[in-house]
Amino acid sequence: MPTAIVKKDKKQKKKDGEWTSKKGVLTKKDYEQELRRLQVELVQLEEWVRHRGLRVVAIFEGRDTAGKGGVIKRMTALLNPRFVRVVALPAPTERERTQWYFQRYVAHLPSAGEMTLFDRSWYNRAGVEHVMGFCTDEEYDEFMRTCPQFERMLVRSGIILVKYWLSVSDEEQERRFLGRINDPSKRWKLSPMDLQARARWVDYSEAKDQMFSYTDIQEAPWYVVETDNKRAAHLNLISHFLSLIPFEEVPHEDIKLPPRQKRSYSRPPKSSQRMVPINYEVE
């Protein structure tokens, strides 16, 4: 995999013919170029998954504003939604609350040749449900006991399971919350539950650490991604994800456009149709 371009700054020093610095910094243009390269590799991975009939599940967990939706959006930007699905389930219905806890998630697991990306997952029980009291202590304890068994079962069945925890600092989360409050286009992202999560920062920290102690298993370990710098997080997570699943470029036959059909046919005038007004012209 090619090395990302690093912008040299005045604080960098040259040592033994190599540029060294405590922190390599990408420009926005460099970021966009590297993101595009990684997104093309994701397309190649998707084709390999389809070609080999693999089943891939990626879980994205983390505090509110940690950037789960943003990184998923960039991962799926060029992928085929028929084979790569994003699952973000709402709160369970009354009927779903009576089911086996994992049941509604199992329905979204991939078939051969597919990838499923969970924007939050069954780990809701170890986080928000536990902290906010939406489940009983018995249900929480049962989840902690059975979740590792459930995930080992998925892995034994052949599913490639990848779990990411997106970590954001207290200060950065507060800045992002304030940004959402002051930006009408982002205000919808704030819910009363988000505000409660902010108020219960320590409770959520404790819940996360407890969750890791039970579910950071060898068969399906947790990978932690620092997300205070969103652009860096996008590149770091995507490049890491690509490194976990060995893939090759799938050969394609040359594509040739067939000749356009030639037949006499008079089409109705555009004036007979409801055309969208052309209010903008773009070079």
Image (tube, rainbow, N blue to C red):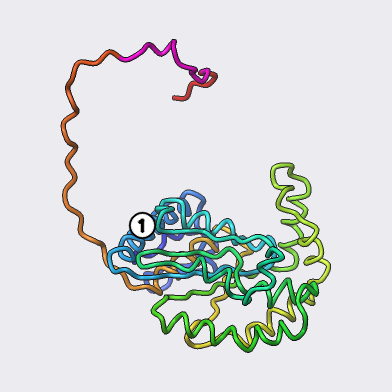
Q: Quadrant of the N terminus?
A: bottom left
| Residue 140 horizontal/vertical position (percent) | 71, 82
Residue under pointer 1: 43
- Residue 267 lies in quadrant: top left
Which residues, given as a range, are shown in magenta? Answer: 267-277
Residue 62 on image: x %, y %: 64, 69
The residue that appears at 42% across and 70% down in the rendered structure is 56
Q: Which three-letter amino acid code belongs to the residue tagged 1?
A: Val
User: Is residue 251 shown left or right of residue 196?
Assistant: left
**Residue nearest the observer in this picture, 1 or 135:** 135
* Residue ID at (19%, 45%): 255
Residue 189 within the segment the image draws in magenta: no
Left or right of 37? Residue 191 is right
Q: Quadrant of the C terminus?
A: top left
Residue 177 location in percent, x, y? 75, 56
Residue 258: x and y, percent? 17, 35
In which image quadrant can residue 83 be found? bottom left
Q: In the rendered view, tell whether residue 73 sits above or below residue 263.
A: below
Foreground: 29 or 239? 239
- Residue sitting at x 63%, y 83%: 212
Q: Is residue 80 left or right of residue 227?
A: left
Q: Is residue 261 above or below residue 22?
A: above
